[in-house]
Image (cartoon, helix red, strand yellow):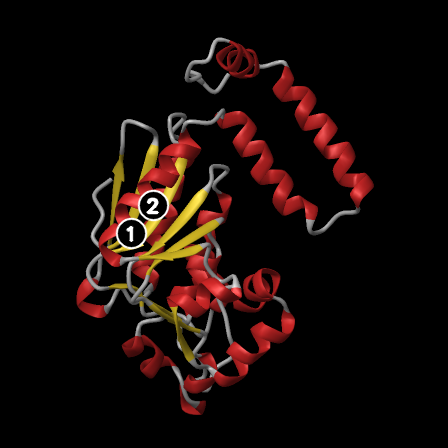
Amino acid sequence: MVYEHITLTRSDEGIVTLTFNRPETRNSMTPAMGDEVVAAVGEIRADSQARVFVLTGAGKAFSSGGDLGMLARDSGAASGGGPSMLGAPRDFYARYLALRQLAIPTIAAINGHAIGAGLCIALACDLRMAASDAKMGMTFAKLGIHPGMGATYFLPRLIGTARAAELFFTGRVFDAAEAERLGVINRAVPREQLHDQVMALAREIAGCAPLAVRMTKKALYRGGEHSLDDMLDFEALQQGITFTTDDAREGVLAIMEKRTPKFRGA
């Protein structure tokens, strides 16, 4: 498929990179770009060779959030809620949060400012690495609107309710160093090293047994909603399944033979 608002690239290691490609608007989010995210996620889910997903932005920003022109057009009492986003917020969210349907690990490479919904979509990824000069913020209150795009779900689960409340209530912008300290991101790195370090992490993940990694991801998100006993049952089931795979045998043999394993996802 030919995309207008995003790019989609693949590496030989099974790393798939989706880049928001509206640098002239700081990669602001529109329904049209969201539709392309949905299509790209469909492509990736159908790709049996995909092992890791990376999300980033073209130019100097990761994403500035909802397109300001759209927000201006659709806001206000007289608007009645515009059809492009505010009149159907769940549909808008669903376009971008389609990436949550990916069974493979997801990494947000925050190459620049990630503001509002732009930060939310980074939080929707499993891992986050940011350029040290990137700025982030849950600026919804400064726009006079309630947080969306899963903001009040993702952020408190990462950093706790009180810290999340401060960021929401003030709408302040913070830097990558504070984001790392709070736990919003895994780590901040110099801008010129971001791509290489993200790819190194992605390759490290891609080098592990793909079935085991996907099942582990499923368990991690299941764990927050279930008891310890429920999770022990789930882990026993999933571990039993992975024990029967060729990858499990290959992993054990590789350790015994002091070599790099060659996992096939079977």
Could you classify mark 2 by the number of other residues whose Cα lies within 10 Å: few (under 14), some (14-19), or many (20 or more)? many
* Residue found farthest to the right: 229
Q: Are marks 1 and 2 in contact (CB under 8 Å)?
A: yes
* Residue found farthest to the left: 24
Could you classify mark 1 by the number of other residues whose Cα lies within 10 Å: few (under 14), some (14-19), or many (20 or more)? some
Location of residue 235 with respect to 100 vertically, above or below: above
Does residue 150 appear to the left or right of 69 in the view shown? right
Count all numbered tags in the image, as a single digit.
2
Q: Position of residue 89 (x, y in %)?
A: 48, 68
At 31% across and 53% down in the image, what residue appears? 56
At 29% across and 51% down in the image, what residue appears? 194
Q: In front: 230, or 200?
A: 200
At 63% across and 13% down in the image, what residue appears? 244
At 44% across and 74% down in the image, what residue appears? 86
* Quarter location, residue 192: bottom left
Q: Which mark is residue 198?
A: 2
Amino acid marked by disc 2:
Val
